[in-house]
């Protein structure tokens, strides 16, 4: 027996549930199919269990895409304020942590976001099924799905199955398989918001610093991020590095400013104040002693008063523009998101519908729109889900 629906959404994550509830509000009969045992796996682990559900500073220029203008429509029509209003409606307490990042309050409070979405789906008459695996999709007058729970059909099909990041949560290439089946092109994917790894020549001085954090500005290409960097046993992580990683091109260097608050003449100025001080000692007042010791090879030896200003300025400039060439990343296992995905040039900017296959929609992380760290990717899930929800 084949069960019929107006809309079927494959993927019970943030984007899928949000699209479903908005379609349900329009009176559409909607079915959500999730292959995991519970919905919202990424929501539950995000923000250390507190779910960084959006960012107050959401804007199109904080998203990466081969088509940088694509996200403008959805982000403008369903904003962070719209989702915040829904969070308030459900009485979920939240706070701004830093840089516009909004988190739920309390341990495991991310469960409140999942419950919010499920309650809204239930109120809109949406049917949600878990532990269902889709094995085949065909399209005639309607979409026909063969699944582990039987056969289903619908007028529209929305792919919200996510990208390739964090495979332990069930990430698969399902969205890519469906795109290929229906002639929808893909921008080659790669890990984003991911720790960077380095070769032995760099690890020789990095590895002893494992666990050390530093306030830096990290640059990759034209993008620069001022946040913390964290040394690991394989290289660098921390918010500044994760941000830069999404813009990093293999073979190119990232540039670290270890003294983001200091000017090029910082050491020359200290010389006039304390001519007998050692450059290494002065550096240790601006960064941790362990990091200062590791960076000290870039500094001339001896007392500041014995050095020319030009040499001190050159040393400071090295510290403020320190090139490092990663050999790779920690991969999808440690990546928070995927960069690349379904080519947005193949989708309607208004509805997320595939031009090559009317009735087929792609939303969320499966699409080639990747946000910065700090709630931006959840906002893309809400905005793209809302856009599709008005049409499916």
Image: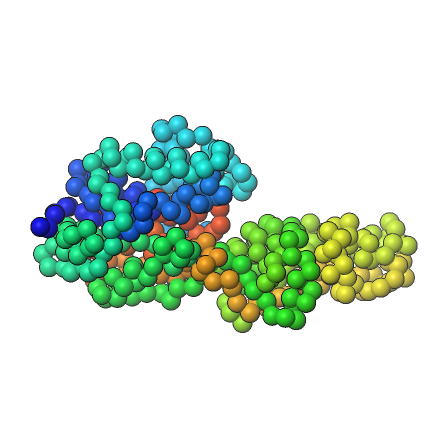
Asked whether 349 or 115 is in front, the reply is 115
Q: Nearer the viewer, residue 136 or 245?
A: 136
Between 135 and 122, the one nearer to me in the picture? 135
Up/down of 220 relative to 52, above or below: below
Which image quadrant for residue 366?
bottom left
Foreground: 22 or 132? 132
Residue 264 can be seen, yes or no: no
Please state if 165 lies on the left or on the right of 316 as rendered: left
The residue drawn where x is 29% and y is 66% is 185
Color theme of the render: rainbow
Residue at 17%, 55% (x, y): give it. 145
- Residue at position x 82%, y 58% in the image: 279
Residue at 34% over, 41% down: 78
Q: Is residue 260 left or right of residue 277?
A: left
Count the labels in the image: 0
Q: Is residue 382 visible?
A: yes
- 251 with respect to 54 (left or right): right
Q: On the image, which quarter does residue 305 sit in? A: bottom right
Q: Where is residue 205 shown, x and y percent of the image?
A: 69, 64
Above-or-below relation of 123 to 250: above
Q: Where is residue 254 shown, x and y percent of the image?
A: 58, 64
Q: Position of residue 19 (x, y in %)?
A: 27, 44
Q: Position of residue 166 (x, y in %)?
A: 42, 55
> Image height check: is 193 above or below 186?
above
């Amino acid at each position: 027996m084949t069960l019929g629906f107006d809309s079927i959404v494959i993927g019970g994550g943030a984007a899928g549930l949000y699209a479903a509830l908005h379609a349900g509000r329009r009176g559409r009969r909607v079915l959500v199919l999730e292959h995991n045992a519970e919905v919202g796996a990424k929501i539950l682990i995000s923000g250390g269990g507190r779910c960084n559900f959006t960012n107050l500073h959401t804007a199109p220029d904080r998203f990466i895409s081969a088509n940088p203008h694509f996200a403008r429509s959805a982000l403008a029509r369903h904003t962070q304020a719209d989702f915040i209003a829904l969070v308030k409606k459900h009485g979920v307490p939240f706070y701004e942590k830093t840089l516009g990042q909004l988190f739920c309050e309390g341990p495991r409070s991310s469960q409140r976001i999942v419950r919010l979405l499920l309650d809204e789906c239930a109120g809109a008459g949406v049917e949600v099924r878990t532990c269902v695996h889709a094995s085949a999709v065909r399209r005639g007058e309607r979409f026909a799905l063969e699944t582990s729970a039987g056969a289903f059909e619908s007028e529209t099909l929305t792919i919200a199955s996510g990208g390739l990041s964090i495979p332990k949560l069930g990430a698969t290439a399902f969205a890519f398989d469906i795109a290929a089946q229906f002639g929808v092109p893909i921008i080659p994917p790669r890990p984003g918001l991911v720790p960077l790894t380095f070769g032995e020549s760099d690890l020789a001085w990095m590895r002893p610093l494992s666990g050390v954090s530093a306030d830096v500005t990290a640059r990759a290409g034209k993008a620069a991020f001022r946040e913390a960097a964290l040394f690991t046993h394989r290289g660098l992580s921390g918010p500044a590095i994760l941000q830069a990683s999404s813009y990093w091109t293999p073979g190119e260097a990232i540039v670290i400013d270890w003294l983001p608050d200091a000017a090029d003449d910082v050491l020359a100025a200290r010389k006039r104040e304390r001519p007998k001080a050692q450059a290494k000692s002065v550096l240790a007042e601006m960064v941790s002693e362990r990091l200062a010791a590791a960076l000290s090879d870039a500094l001339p030896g001896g007392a500041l008063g014995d050095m020319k200003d030009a040499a001190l300025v050159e040393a400071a400039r090295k510290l403020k523009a320190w090139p490092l060439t990663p050999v790779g990343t920690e991969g999808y296992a440690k990546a928070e998101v995927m960069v690349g995905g379904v080519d947005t040039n193949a989708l309607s900017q208004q509805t997320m519908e595939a031009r090559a296959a009317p009735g087929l929609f792609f939303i969320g992380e499966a699409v080639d729109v990747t946000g910065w760290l700090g709630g931006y990717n959840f906002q893309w899930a809400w905005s793209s889900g809302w856009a599709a929800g008005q049409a499916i």
